[in-house]
Image (cartoon, grey):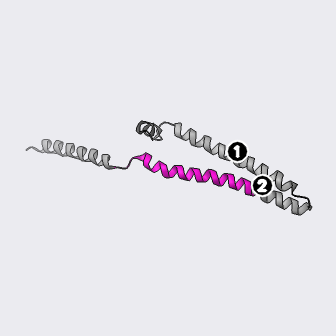
Amino acid sequence: MTDPEQSKRLAELDARIAKLKGKDAPRPHQEEHYSQAQLAWRMVIELVAGLLIGFGMGYGLDQLFGTIPIFLVIFTFLGLAAGVKTMMRSAEEIRRDAMTPGTGAEERDKDGD
């Protein structure tokens, strides 16, 4: 066997080995499930944080001015609105990232996930 022929066969063997190793590699959308859970927790935390900040500000203003809990109610609703707005912004960001080519959305659609 000549040296160039042996080099060619080794290169073909390396290519076949690399191809077979690629089949066993984990698919990227399998890790996406963990990412989705993280995004869901992020959205829940944003909503709760908005509520708690509004509640705290309203309670503090009521204590400061000695009023009935009018500021508490107003700022709790404002905190809820801010939390929902932040959640919607996060959902839009997630949707935009999912539609961006090259993020794996096409393969998830193809696999039925």
Identify the residue position indicated by label 1 in the image: 85
- x, y percent for residue 74: 83, 51
Give amino acid for label 1.
Lys
Q: Quadrant of residue 92?
A: top right
Q: Is residue 37 magenta?
A: yes
48 or 106: which is nearer to us?
48
Q: Which residues are magenta?
A: 25-52
The reply, left or right, for residue 61 in relation to residue 84 is: right
CA gap between label 2 and label 1 equals: 14 Å
Q: Pointers 2 and 1 in contact (CB under 8 A)?
A: no
Q: Callout 1: 10 Å neighbours few (<14), some, many (20+)?
A: some
Q: Is residue 106 magenta?
A: no
Relative to 20, is 108 on the left or the right?
Answer: right
Which mark is drawn over residue 54? 2
- Residue 13 occupies quadrant: top left
Give left or right: position of 30 versus 15.
right
Q: Residue at x 69, y 55 (%)?
A: 48
Label placed on residue 59: none
Secondary structure category for the residue under label 1? helix
Q: Earlier in the sequence, mark 2 or mark 1?
A: 2
Q: Residues within 10 Å of mark 2 (few under 14, many from 20)?
A: many
Identity, as a three-letter code, of the amino acid under mark 2: Gly
State the quadrant of the C terminus: top left
Task: Look at the image and tell me in which quarter the N terminus lies.
Answer: top left
Residue drawn at 31 percent across, 49 percent down:
24
Q: Residue 44 in the image: state x and y as whole percent.
A: 63, 52
Residue at figure coordinates x 31%, y 46% from the top left: 23
Residue 45 percent location from the top left of the image: 64, 55
Of residues 62 and 102, the one nearer the viewer is: 62
Is residue 80 or residue 106 the one in the foreground? 80
Give the residue furthest to the left. 1
Q: Secondary structure at mark 2?
A: helix
